[in-house]
Image (tube, helix red, strand yellow):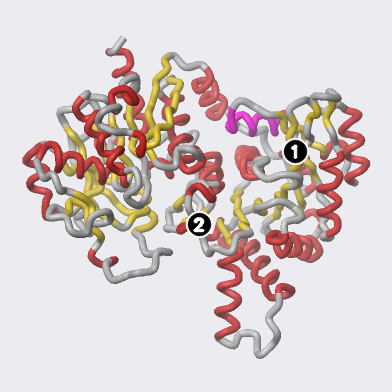
Amino acid sequence: MTPKYIFVTGGVTSSLGKGIIAASLAKLLQARGYKVTIQKLDPYINVDPGTLNPYEHGECYVTEDGAETDLDLGHYERFLNHPTSQANNVTTGRIYQHVINREREGAFLGKTVQVIPHITDEIKRRIKLLGETGNYEIVITEIGGTVGDIESLPYIESVRQLLWELKDEDALVIHLTLLPYLSSSNELKTKPTQHSVKLLLESGVQPDILVCRTEHAITKEMRKKIALFCNVDANSVIEALDVPTIYDVPLMMLKEKLDKTVLSKLKLSAKNEPDLESWKNFLTRHKNPKNEIRIGLIGKYVELPDAYKSIIEAFIHAGASNEARVRVQYIHSELIADDNVAQKLGDLDGILVAPGFGDRGIEGKITAIKYAREHNVPFFGICLGMQMAVIEFARNVIGWKDAHSTEMNAKTKHPVIDMMSDQKNITKKGGTMRLGSYVCELSKNSIAYKAYDKSKVNERHRHRYEFNPKFQAEFEANGLHITGINPETKLAEIVELKDHPYFIGVQFHPEYKSTVLNPHPLFVRFLKAAVAFNLSSK
């Protein structure tokens, strides 16, 4: 079967939620029995977001096969409950790199290499490759940026060409736009949407469906007006009201019949009504909690919560599983010190020390971990958070006051965290880390084993530095146990304190694998411990 293609573009302003609309539509089509995938085309020239500052682009999401990708892929996985891969995220940098490499190899036989046809041909190849190799029935392609951006033009042109090449029923365009509300005149304005569609038409692309973000309901007359001026039928003007959570969007799109409209235009049968009972059950638990807990997220990018997007969403999934509302308190690690730690962390039911790179704010993270350890507050350390837990224990329990990571102090006599030996001679930052899924074997009777309920798991990684195995005996003797190891390298993946309600650090990133229908067991267990701590302190 030839895949059907759906392209999602955006206009008027950025951050309207193209990724959430794409993921919601994919969820509805999946629930109707179709095999669906989503890909993101990112206009920036970086090869991937792996070296981007989180303040610039938010979280860098990592797939099973080790691709460093846009955070929207996390939304795709959380909604579809299915892993993505390198093929699901394409950047301008990767497109140009591939074309230039081919030119250097002589692949174009001396022709002048141009945006059209060479760049657009490669974009089209990437779009079609995902559908053909993955055996998908429907491929949804989200185009990053906003219509009218210079960076997005080659992608829009590629869509135009594909629409010309494919049959009418094999492809369609959904354009997400904004209907701003003017409080002074008490009305929604359609003109920005009209201008946005006009820009898209100037590139030769006619949208088939308009999804309109709005704070107020769209009247029947307004739908007709938008349809008339934007050259779509009235049933193809979809209302996207603001909702309490992103997880309400699939149900809102179901109510608006977005999936039925799409299937009709693609000449596909509606099959069965979508089975969303599990999704609705999740929302019921999420919106009707029995307890409320406060979790401190200790990091250095807390001014931009998107830097920790997957962690925040994992809290939502695990919170619903525990029937608990999670109030996340973002705490900048640079602002934590010995003289204020009790004041900043004293009212928390759990402490999560977040991943990161570099030495900024690490002493605050170490101070927070010491507080959690000494006051029996449930603690969860992820990646750098796990490494800081090792350093804290080495300094304050074993007594190695200079203990450190060689990332921050190359001259320490107790390098309890050190770079992997096969990375020490690599100087380029991009693509040098341990990335993607690796096996972890768990010790029986450990916190991790009880959480996962199995002895072997696969988790995703993104780091260069590791627990230094030459110090393992001293840590074990003093009570910090290595309860998860990689069976091939024998490197530590999980550390735990057993005489503590919940104290666990993991070298991997469990947040990447948490989904609505499968909340991550370590997050579920962490929040369960936080609920118990909260109840015991009342």
Instruction: Identify the disc placed on residue 289.
Output: none
Residue type, mark 1 in image: Lys
Residue 487 visible in the snapshot: no
Q: Nearer the viewer, mark 2 or mark 1?
A: 2
Residue linked to disc 2: 49
10 Å crowding of disc 1: few (<14), some (14-19), many (20+): some
Residue linked to disc 1: 260
- Does the CB distance between marks 2 and 1 fall below 8 Å? no
Residue at 69% from the left image edge and 87% from the top image edge: 111
Q: Earlier in the sequence, mark 2 or mark 1?
A: 2
The residue nearer to you, when weighing 247 against 213, is 213
Q: x, y percentage for residue 442?
A: 22, 43
Q: Which residues are magenta?
A: 245-254
Whether 250 is among the magenta residues is yes
Question: In terms of secondary structure, where does tag 1 sit?
Answer: helix
In the depicted structure, whether residue 283 falls above or below residue 61: above
Q: x, y percentage for residue 222?
A: 88, 31
Residue type, mark 2 in image: Pro
In the depicted structure, whether residue 511 falls above or below residue 63: above
Q: CA distance from mark 2 to mark 1?
A: 35 Å
Instruction: Decide if residue 193 is on the left or right side of residue 143.
Output: right
Residue at 58% from the left image edge and 57% from the top image edge: 135
Instruction: Decide if residue 461 is on the left or right side of residue 414.
Output: right
Residue at 27% from the left image edge and 40% from the top image edge: 505
User: Which quadrant of the figure contains the N terminus?
Assistant: bottom right
Whether 375 is among the magenta residues is no
